[in-house]
Image: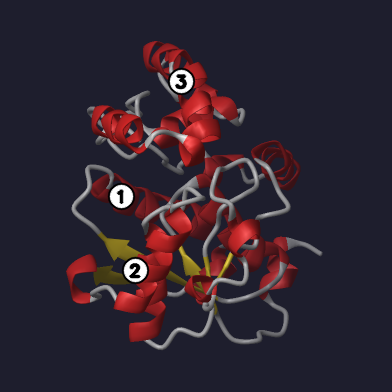
Amino acid sequence: MSAEQALGGPQKGPVHLAWTAGWDSTFWMLQLLLVDGRAVQPHYIIRPEASTGQEIDAMNRIRRELFKRYPKSREYLMPTRFIDVRSIGYSVHHLTEWERIRKTQKLNEQYPLLACYCEKYDIPSLKVCINRDETVALAAIKSSPLLGALSSPLTEFNKQTTRALVTSRGWQHIMHLTVFCRRPKKGRPCGVCGPCFDAVTTGLGYRLPVLRRIIAHGQVPLRRWYRANRSAMNPKLKEKILRLMKGRY
C-alpha cells in the first residue's frame, strides 16, 4: 500500500503521540500516517530546556517537508497541542511510584510528567516512543500504574531497523530534519549529553560534527559502566557522579 493510499483509507480516530521531533517519535508518526493510515494528534510539553526551541523549529520543518512530499497528510496530522509544563503539576501517587522504580531502574523523569499530563487532560492512551536500543527498562515495569495511559510502540525495534525502514520507504529527507541533543551548541549537537551518547552507540553518530562525535565516543566506557552498575552503586559515590554529570546526562 502506498502512503497516499494509506492516508485515503478508513480512519479509527486519532492516535495520541508524544512528539519531540526526535528520531523515534517522528518515525512512528510517519508509520501511523503513511503506512497505517491513521490520523495523529501530537502532544508537546514545553519545558525550560536548551533544546526546546530547536525541537519546535524542527517540528515546523518536518511538517513542511511532510506536506510537500505527501500533500494528503495535511488532513491527518493534527495541530500539535503545546502545554506549558507548569500547568500540569505532579500527582503524589505518580511521583511516589517513580521514586520506587528509580531505586532499581533508570526511568526518565518524562514518565511521571506524561502520566500526570494524561491524567489531567483525560488522555486514555499516549504513545511514547522509546526503542529497545535505549536504557529505559519498560519491560521490567510494564505492570506499574505509572504506565497506565502510556505505551511504547517501538520496543521491538532498534535504530538499525528503523534506519533500514526509513531508507526503503524513502523517508530520509524527512528524518534528516529530526533532532536529539538536549543541550545544542549554536544549533548543533553538543557531543556531551546522554542523547548524543545514545546517537553514537546506536548508529546515528554521523549526525554529530566530527569533534563532538569524538567527544561523545570518548564517554562511552564511563557511561556504559555507570549504566550497568548504578543500581548496586554506593549511594555516596552515585551522588558524586550525578553531581559531576549534572546537565550532561
- Find disc 3 in the rendering and name its residue: 222
User: Residue sitting at 37 percent across and 23 percent down?
Assistant: 191
- Separation (CA) of disc 3 from disc 1: 33 Å
Q: In the rendered structure, which amino acid carries the disc numbered 3?
A: Leu
Say which of marks 1 and 2 sits in front.
Answer: 2
> Mark 2 sits on what residue?
95
Residue position for label 1: 57
Q: How many marks?
A: 3
Local secondary structure at mark 2 = helix
Mark 2 surroundings within 10 Å by alpha-carbon count, few (fewer than 14), some (14 through 19), many (20 or more):
some
Q: Earlier in the sequence, mark 1 or mark 2?
A: 1
Amino acid residing under circle 1: Asp
Residue under the point 44% across and 34% down: 233
Compared across the picture, whether 52 is left or right of 138 comes to left
Q: Where residue 11 appears, x then y in whole percent?
A: 66, 84
Q: Quadrant of the N terminus?
A: bottom right
Judge left or right: residue 102 versus residue 28: left
Question: Quarter of the image containing the C terminus?
Answer: top left
Q: Residue at x 26, y 27 (%)?
A: 244
Mark with earlier residue (2, 3): 2
- The image shows residue 155, relative to residue 113, as above or below, that is above
Residue 77 pos. (x, y %): 50, 71
Callout 2, which amino acid? Answer: Leu
